[in-house]
Amino acid sequence: MPRTRKEKERAQKLWEERRELLRFGYGKVAEFLVRNARQAYRQALQAWAKGDLKAAEQLLRSALEKVPDAPDPLLALGQLLLKQGRTEEALGILSNAREIDRDNPQAHYWFARALEATGRLRRAVEAYEQTLRQNPPSDLIQEVRQRLQAIQETLSQQPSPTLSDEQAKALEEALHWAKFYLEIGFPRRAREYLLQAQAIAPEHPQVQDLANRLKAALPDW
C-alpha cells in the first residue's frame, strides 16, 4: 500500500535525523551522549547567529567533551576560533576535523584558511588543492580558485626565487614557528627555528628581521 505524503515526509525526517546522529557517533557512543552533543551543537549555532561567540564556543566545547570526534562541532569550533583571530588554536582543531571528515571539502577548505592565516602559504595551497579534489559545490570551487590565485601572486613577489619548493616550504615553516615562539615569550625556542631558517636562506629579509629582534630579546645571543 503506497504511503501518504505525510508518511513520506516523516520517513525522510527520521532518516535525516538518523544520518545526523551517525555523524555524532551514534552506534559508537552512548545514545544519550550523542543526542546531548547534537543539542549543544545546535544551541551553539544559535548563539553564534546571535553574535554570542563566548556562549557558542562553550557549547561547542561541551559537545566535543561528550563526543570528541564529532566532525560538525570540530569544524564549527575551528571556524569560530579563526574568526576570533586565534589562528594556532583553530589550526589544531581544523587539522583534526580534516582527518576525521576526510571526504568533506569544507574541512579541507577551512584547514587551508587557517594555514593561510598563519602565513604558511605553500601548505595552504596544498590544502586548497585537496579541497578541489573532494568535489566541492561550484561556489566553493570559485572561492578556492580565487584564493589560490591570490596566494600565487603573493608567492611570486617573495624573495629567494632560487629556493626549491621544498626549501621554500621549510623556510616558511621555520619562520612561522620562530615568530610564534618569539611573540608568546619563548625567545630561546624561537632561536632554534631561526637557525633553521638561516640555514636555508640567511639573506632573506624576514630571516634578518627576526635575527635582529631575537638579538634584542636575548642579551647572550
Image (cartoon, helix red, strand yellow):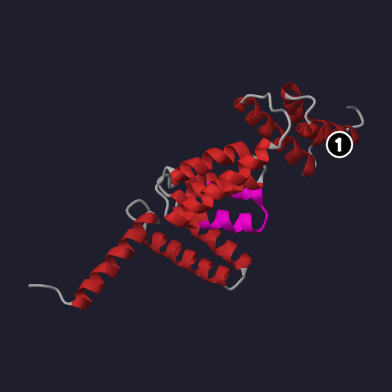
Q: Is residue 216 above or below residue 89?
A: above
Residue that extends furthest to the left in the rendered view of this protein: 1
Task: Name the amino acid, label 1.
Answer: Arg
x then y, percent, for residue 9: 25, 73
Q: Nearest the camera: 114 or 21?
A: 114
Q: Residue at x 40, y 56 (%)?
A: 24
Q: Nearest the camera: 28 or 13?
A: 13
Magenta stretch: includes residue 16: no
x then y, percent, for residue 156: 66, 36
Q: Is residue 144 left or right of residue 174?
A: left
Quarter of the figure with residue 11:
bottom left
Q: Is residue 52 left or right of residue 133?
A: right
Q: Is residue 127 in view?
A: yes
Q: In terms of secondary structure, what is the magenta stretch mainly?
A: helix
Q: Nearest the camera: 15 or 145?
A: 145
Q: Residue at x 52, y 49 (%)?
A: 144
Quarter of the figure with residue 157:
top right
Q: Quick one: SS at disc 1?
A: helix
Mark 1 lies on residue: 213
Q: Is residue 68 in view?
A: no
Magenta stretch: includes residue 89: yes
Q: Residues within 10 Å of mark 1 (few under 14, many from 20)?
A: some
Tally of marks: 1
x then y, percent, for residue 3: 14, 73
x then y, percent, for residue 121: 63, 40
Quadrant containing the N terminus in the rendered view: bottom left
- Highlighted magenta segment, given as a residue range: 76-94
Q: Is residue 113 left or right of residue 189?
A: left
Quadrant containing the C terminus in the rendered view: top right
Q: Is residue 152 above or below residue 147?
A: above
